[in-house]
Image: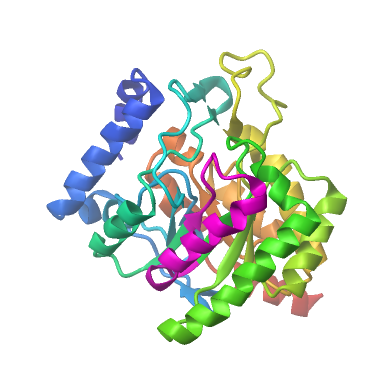
Amino acid sequence: MLYPLVRPLLFRLDPETAHRVSFGGLDAAARIGLASLAFPAVPDDPVEAMGLTFPNRIGLAAGLDKDAEHIDGLAALGFGHIECGTVTPRPQPGNPRPRLFRIVAAQALVNRMGFNNGGLEAFLANRARARWQGIVGLNIGRNFDTPNDRAVDDYLAGFRGCCAHASYVAVNVSSPNTKGLRDLQHEDALAALMATLKGEQAKLADRHGKYTPLALKIAPDLQPVAVDGIARLCVRHRVDAVIATNTTLSREGVEGLPHASEAGGLSGAPLRERANAVVRRLARALDGALPVIGAGGVMSGADAREKLEAGATLVQLYTGLVYRGPALVAECVRATRGFGARRAGAASAG
C-alpha cells in the first residue's frame, strides 16, 4: 500500500487540509474506477444486526464524512457499513479553526469541530448522488443554538429527513463539542427523546413502507451506573442498537504531549480501554436484547477483535484510518471474520 509513503506528506499539512486532500484523491480514484483496484480485497463475513445484513463487521464511524459527500470512495475501502454525519437541520460552520489536532506520539486526535456541516438539505442531496448500494447510517444531532428543551424538534427534523434515505439513523447525544449536548444522556431527557423518536419511527414506517432502525450513540465518560440506566432505557423503548462510544474528555495517556491540552474530544489509541469498558458494561447490562456497535481506539485488527470479545456485534473506526490508512479496514475484517461462529463454538464446548 502507498499510504506509509504518503502519510509523512499529509502530516506536514494541518489536519483539516490533509483530510480534504485525502478525500480529493479518494473521490477521483472512485470516479475513474481505480479505487476498487487500489485497495486489498475484503472477504465476506455477513452478520445480522438491527434487522439488516452487514457484509462484514467493520464500519466507518460518523465524523469523517460529515456531509455524505464521499460514500462511493469510502465504500471502495471495504467497509461493511458507512455512517455519515453528524448532520443538523440548519447549516452551521462549527467552531473556529484550528479545531483538529494530531497527537502523533500517542496515535490520537483531539477535535472540537462542533458539528460543522452544510445542513440537512445539502446532506440528503449528497446522499442521493451516491451510487453505492451498501449499508449507510445517517447520524443526526441538534444545532448548536437550539436549547436542550427544544432539542427534540431538531432530532425529529433530522429523523424525518433521513428516514427514507438511511439504512439506519444514529442519534448523537454524546459529542463533547456542542455545549450542553451530553446533558441529553441524563435519564429523563433521554427517555423523553427516545420515546418521541420511537413514536415517529412507527409513523414513518407506515408512511414509507420501510422500518428504519434507530441507534443511540453514547459517551465514554459515563459512570457505570449511568451506562446501566441507558441500557434499561434502550430496552424499554426498543431502541435498535447502541453505539459505544464517542470521543472522551479525559486526557489519560496523553498527559504532557503536544496538543493534549487543547479543548475537545480525544480519539485514537488512548481511548481504547475506556471505550472497551463501556462496551463491556453495556453488553452485560443489555444481555443480548439489542446489539452494541463498538467504536473508539481501533488501530489494528487485534483492537477490532477485542471490541467483539467485549460484547460488540459490529465495530467502527475513524482515527485509525488517519494513522494506518486504508489497509486497516481489510486487516480488521480479516481479524474479525467468523467471530460469531467461533464464539458459538466456544459456548457449546463450555
Residue 234 in the image: above or below residue 125: below
Instruction: Determine the residue positioned at 71% across, 41% down.
Output: 273
Is 17 contained in the magenta span?
A: no
Residue 251 in the image: above or below residue 181: above
Numbered marks: total: 0
| Image location (x, y in percent) of residue 89 | 44, 52
| 64 vs 184, nearest the viewer | 184
Residue 258: image quadrant is top right
* Residue furthest out toward the right: 225
| 202 vs 3, nearest the viewer | 202
Instruction: Determine the residue positioned at 53% across, 51% down.
Output: 141
Q: Main secondary structure of the magenta part?
A: helix
| Image location (x, y in percent) of residue 326 | 37, 45
Is 163 contained in the magenta span?
A: yes
**8 left or right of 168 in image:** left
Residue range of the region highlighted in magenta in the rendering: 139-168
**88 left or right of 74 in image:** right
Q: Quadrant of the N terminus?
A: top left
| Image location (x, y in percent) of residue 113 | 49, 33
Instruction: Determine the residue positioned at 82% across, 64% down.
Output: 285
| 167 vs 157, nearest the viewer | 157
